[in-house]
Image: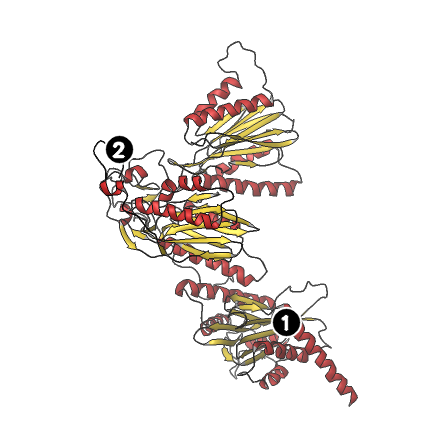
Amino acid sequence: MTSIGTGYDLSTTTYSPDGRVFQIEYAQKAIENSGTAIGVSCKDGVVMAVEKVVVSKMLVPGTMRRAHLVDHHSGVVISGLISDGRQLATRARDECSSYKSVYDSPIPGHVLAERLANFAHVYTLYAYVRPFGCAALLGAHDDINGYQLYLVEPSGVSYRYFGAAVGKGKQAAKTALEKLDFKTLTCREAVKELAKIIVDVHDETKDKLYELEMCWVCEESKNKSQLVPQDLVDEARKAAEAAQDDDSDMDDDE
Amino acid sequence: MSGLRLTEGSRGLAASVAVEGAPLTRTQVPYVTGSSVLGMKCADGVVIACDTMASYGTLARFKSLSRMHQVSPNCILGVGGDYSDFQQLQTMVDAEMTAQYVANDGLTLSPKAIHSFLARHMYHRRCKVDPLWNTVIVAGFDKGEGVLSLVDLFGTAFSSDVLATGFGLHLGLPLLRNAHRPDITVAEAKGVLEDILKVLFYRDARTNDVVQLASVTAAGVEIGKMTKLKTEWGYKSFVEGARVGDDSSW
Amino acid sequence: MDALGLLRPGASVSGLPAAHTPGAATGFALGDHAGRAQAAPAAEPGVVASTASGPLQRRFQPYQNNGGTVLAVAGKGFCVVASDTRLGLGYSIPSRKVSRILKMTDKVVLASSGMQADMLTLHKTLRMRLVQYQQTHQKHMSLTAASQMLSNMLYTRRFFPYYTFNVLGGIDENGEGWAYGYDAIGSHEKVSAVCSGTGQTLIQPVLDNQIEFKQQWGAPKVDLSLEATVELIRDAFTSAGERDIYTGDFVEICKITKDGVDVEEFQLKLD
């Protein structure tokens, strides 16, 4: 990018001469400024974690959530603008309830992912709206496809992943995720792995305080979406932080 | 949802629309109907009971339909009246419970709150002159005590130690009042309710002999299997019937 | 079809041949509550056939009468508001103990008879308005303010009225006891004694005679004590319960004095 935008970046309704829609790319930038969110689909479930940067130490823990349940069998975690994310979560809930009222069965993961992506996509087509400044990791379970993890982006794409990462530390997180064996990994282990990745990619110099929010749909939760029990999360985070301290001690020794 | 309607609304099911001059197309009359529901509050919980028939006018259309619905771990409904309206009620209550679940704020709806929710909805519908044609008995157990309440198609709502709807209001309620004691147990009450269902089966032509009992206690909800009543047709007055000059009603 | 109509073979709907819809033939449905008291011949309660020409149309009737008698009697420095607790429906009594009384403040009590669903809604809305008033004005609503607000609320439903007959009683800003009687759409009158509901015709003349000394020509008008008033009210309800099938079971008697509201319960016949 020589000079950013050059007049083609004010609206989603105009392509740049080289075929890009800058507003979508800027929306993705908004996500890259936000706390990292990662998710894995593993042997016995799907687990998602998000680093929620806390803007003030006076905030009550648990406020301004980034992990949302959207139905009994599915949940989303949000990276990017919190309020845009809530809009997406609300839409996901409406889609779940609407599907249920029509088909009397829970919405399959791929249908929900597609509908959410369609919803996001519409906001890339008109001059009077802006694309969503957030991405949603969607975890779901259904009887046909089992546990599923999707990433819905502001461009309106959604892909299914074994492991996905968005936000500030996505590069480092992806590298770490690639080392996992999703076929054998259990959710209990994944909670620890995800905590470790979040702790590792967290930039202590920029954001001091952060909360770790986790959400899963797994055998242990009887295929229901749940926020991962707080004691499990705390334990995993503590272990990850201890391990990190050990590492840095070793670094000092060298 | 957003104020903008960029996409097709995911809700907004077709509403019933009255075209001027044309007959109204709302539930003005119930079609497939369930008959009585009975309920009794006990020392250790609540019991409700109903038969399993849904009639189409005078036709015994469906003969093994459950008219009970579990709402939460400590609350159930027993419903009489229009069966399709009952199913809509189920959908609506379930959606509300899902909304509670996803909020994930540690709050749940108490049986009392569920009763109120139903009462407001039923009243709202009667005010639109588009009622859900049901009488609903809410049975629950909360804070160590049984909850037994009723809502009807007008939004009438109250709680009582004994409740009966439909024909049970005439034949069952007096029997329930006789049998009730503050210290009656769930096990004992089940026997009473079964006896009353038998009376209803003998006399209410919209009731069958396959029945379902359910209880809510500290241990939670237990909706029983459909069971066939043991009936006795050999009573003298049943066999001989009405006699001239006798005021026997059979 | 009402319970009696059901036992009558070949009963038709409002004199018309039975309609062809299966619903029309539904002998007994659960919503079959309304209007049995009026004993419309064999009509399915809650439903009537329209008499207009054109296709036969059967419409849901949104009103129901649950009966009940309410009264308020004011005296020197007190007011008594009372209501029975029977919830009636046609010839049935679905419940013997449903309160019809709303304690609005420590000095104002409302009792409503008529349709229980409407009463419930009215009381809920009133309760909400009372809290709003208390919070914006930092004081409890006075009897006069409450009486006007109730009238306004009833009138908001002028063209789809609350089927409720209200009496309001309490102590005003000057410490005087007063009663207010209402019709369903908010017309009201400040009086010293009023009775509404299914027992109105039985009790109001007694109150006129005993409280207002009507027809007692030349007799000196004496103010009844609180105890004498309550005794009169007990007798009035006992008598009404004798002849009115919608009045019975229990009476809740609220004695409002400067010290607050004291409620006593009085047993009537359970027949």
Question: In this image, B46 relative to C225: left or right?
Answer: left
- Local packing at callout 2 (Cα closer than 10 Å; few below 14, some 14-19, many 20+) is few
- State the residue in front, B247 or C168: B247
Measuring 66% from the left and 30% from the top, which residue is drawn there?
C259
Image vertical order of residue B175 relative to residue B186, above or below:
above
Residue on which disc 2 sits: B247
Measuring 50% from the left and 68% from the top, which residue is drawn there?
A73
Chain containing the residue with disc 1 = A
Measuring 39% from the left and 65% from the top, which residue is drawn there?
A103
Mark sitting on residue A232:
1
Residue C26: percent from left, percent from top: 29, 46
**Residue found at the very far bottom of the displayed protein:** A254
- State the residue in front, B160 or A160: B160
Residue B2: percent from left, percent from top: 52, 62
Q: Amino acid at mark 2?
A: Asp
**Residue found at the very far right of the displayed protein:** A253
Question: In this image, C33 relative to A126: left or right?
Answer: left
Q: Quadrant of residue A56?
A: bottom right
Regarding mark 1 in the picture, which secondary structure is present there?
A: helix
Measuring 53% from the left and 42% from the top, which residue is drawn there?
C125
Regarding mark 2 in the picture, which secondary structure is present there?
A: loop
Q: Amino acid at mark 1?
A: Leu
Q: Are marks 2 and 1 on the same chain?
A: no
Residue C45 visible in the shown view:
yes
Mark sitting on residue C21:
none
